Image (spheres, rainbow, N blue to C red):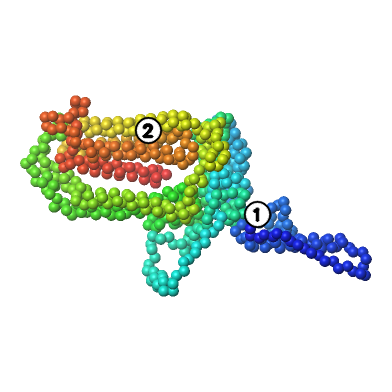
Amino acid sequence: EGREDLQVNRLETQIWIKPDTQKTDVDFSEILNAIQEIAKDVNIFFDELEGVNSPSKDDDSLLHHGNLTSTSDDASRLEVVGEEVPDKNKANGLYFRDGKCRIDYILVYRKSNPQTEKREVFERNIRAEGLQMEKESSLTNSDIIFVKLHAPWEVLGKYAELMNVRMPFRRKIYYLHRRYKFMNRIEKQISRFRGWLPRKPMKLDKETLPDLEENDCYTAPFSQQRIHHFIIHNKDTFFNNATRSRIVHHILQRVKYEEGKNKIGLNRLLSNGSYEAAFPLHEGSYRSKNSIRTHGAENHRHLLYECWASWGVWYKYQPLDLVRRYFGEKIGLYFAWLGWYTGMLFPAAFIGLFVFLYGVTTLNHCQVSKEVCQATDIIMCPICDKYCPFMRLSDSCVYAKVTHLFDNGATVFFAVFMAVWATVFLEFWKRRRAVIAYDWDLIDWEEEEEEIRPQFEAKYSKKERMNPISGKPEPYQAFADKCSRLIVSASGIFFMICVVIAAVFGIVIYRVVTVSTFAAFKWALIRNNSQVATTGTAVCINFCIIMLLNVLYEKVALFLTNLEQPRTESEWENSFTLKMFLFQFVNLNSSTFYIAFFLGRFTGHPGAYLRLINRWRLEECHPSGCLIDLCMQMGIIMVLKQTWNNFMELGYP
């Protein structure tokens, strides 16, 4: 079997039979029986010795039923252990009815749905792939059927090798540098001094939560031929739940439900209504009657809730190893970035607060706001042709003071600091990401984990060419076909950006038209602050347009990305991300750029005002400057957008 723990080259057994001169007939049958008993004892000895010398291997993986040599007691004991199933497995809803097969994925459909033939073909192909299936009707609605899927060990091993899933195969060994006695004494004194200090409040308490300790192992792409190299204590738990669900999801995305090159995958069945939903299960309840500090965690989900998702631990560092173990590397890296970004925002927020407080303290010493407030004799021209009265410059005193809070001498320092902060944030995140990639053994992960999308395989299955790296045939997309698809996609992106610019132009027309409307309003508060009211309502309308275009463009970006037929999942994600970034950058910042760089720059002068379509006079900045309009634009959009996002993430669920 290629085992390196114990190599037995040859077993030489020499049996010397001394002839008895007094006995002429030798009973060779008794001698042969004795030899068989000796050989049996030797086999048992080496089997036990091999099991002792290789503790990292799974006991089941060492059993080969074809040539098993063991005593009857040992065989019966192994059978009993294999058949023992905890009763709680049958009651916790995570296993099949037999309590042995763990549920790796759930499909949901309605019996009244007419897409019966597609489901039957799909489920028949699922069973052909080796997945086990069990159906159960809902307790509250008999029309709803749950299809429970389980991936046995053979299927997991086969697809883990195809998907290059990295699994632990050797524990890491750390070598400590030799230190001098003087340095050791200093380190002991420092550690003793640290023991007197209070513990870091943000650090996770690993003593009371021992499950936070991860197995520190090297990983390698799984291979069934080299299975003896991997650390397999138990086949049922060797692949964690996230990996099992990922493998089953990979299978479901490549199973056909009808004849045809595009009739493939679970996503299409979800979109056409054949299935109502598809999802993996959690590991159990996130709550427990017993305290986690006294009785331990019920499961990984309970542990994550107590040390990560609970409101009481909002100030502590994230248990990224636990997040990775439960949700996988991708979501683990996302929360690692999110935590790093949140932490790096603290110095930026502190400096921004300092700049604002500096503006508050120097408000009475600002020469510009003083001159504006004291200019009671300076008369300003009306800001619109109808209903807008002449106004004194001193009427803008409040807006001039508010402008100073955000635009003062320290703002230049804040701008330089944010430019440096953005660069430092990116470079330090690269270092942090490299550390995480090394700890999680994700170096060159994308190159090894690349797999062709099932939609690409189905579309170009008839055209194949040899991969120059792997030497295997794979689907091939012609250059002309790829270019034509990219041109259509780029045209769609350009069209949607033009839609955003047209929406901004509509907002500009709204601002120009409604200034005179608010100037003739019945309420004095709005009539006296018509320009601010115009800006506020325009920003709210702009926010609604931004959110609607976001929803629309996300669907357009999905359609265009699928139209391009990217070869791999990473290419699909990169293409989709680029489209969303370009659109959201234009969608969120176009109106802000207009206010910051174009508003009030092309208005003309009294007697020769520039007009839009020879009818409407272009909008001017407030007498105190355009910064108050810019602050309202950014403030309202950011506050409303954050409020909406938090409602959708926390309130709506």
- Where in the figure is residue 11, as x and y percent of width and height? 74, 61
Instruction: Name the quadrant of the C terminus.
Output: top left
Counting labels gives 2
- Where in the figure is residue 50, as x and y percent of width and height? 66, 61
Which residue corresponds to the image point at 27% horizontal and 42% vertical from the top-left? 634
Which residue corresponds to the image point at 32% horizontal and 35% vertical from the top-left? 545
Query: Outermost residue, front direction?
Result: 468
- Where in the figure is residue 307, as x and y percent of width and height? 44, 57
Which residue corresponds to the image point at 21% horizontal and 32% vertical from the top-left? 512
Q: Is residue 457 left or right of residue 62?
A: left
Which residue corresponds to the image point at 48% horizontal and 46% vertical from the top-left? 446
- Please, what is the three-letter code of the amino acid marked with disc 2? Ile
Nearer the N terminus, badge 1 or badge 2? 1
Q: Which mark is residue 2?
A: 1
Disc 2 marks which residue? 493
**Quarter of the figure with residue 571:** top left
User: Mark 2 falls on what kind of element?
Assistant: helix
**Which of 443 and 591 lies nearest the eye of the viewer?**
443
Question: Can residue 521 be spotted in the picture?
Answer: no
User: Does 51 sit above or below residue 66?
Assistant: below
Q: Is residue 243 left or right of residue 638?
A: right
User: Does 137 sit above or below residue 410?
Assistant: above
Q: Residues within 10 Å of mark 1 (few under 14, many from 20)?
A: few
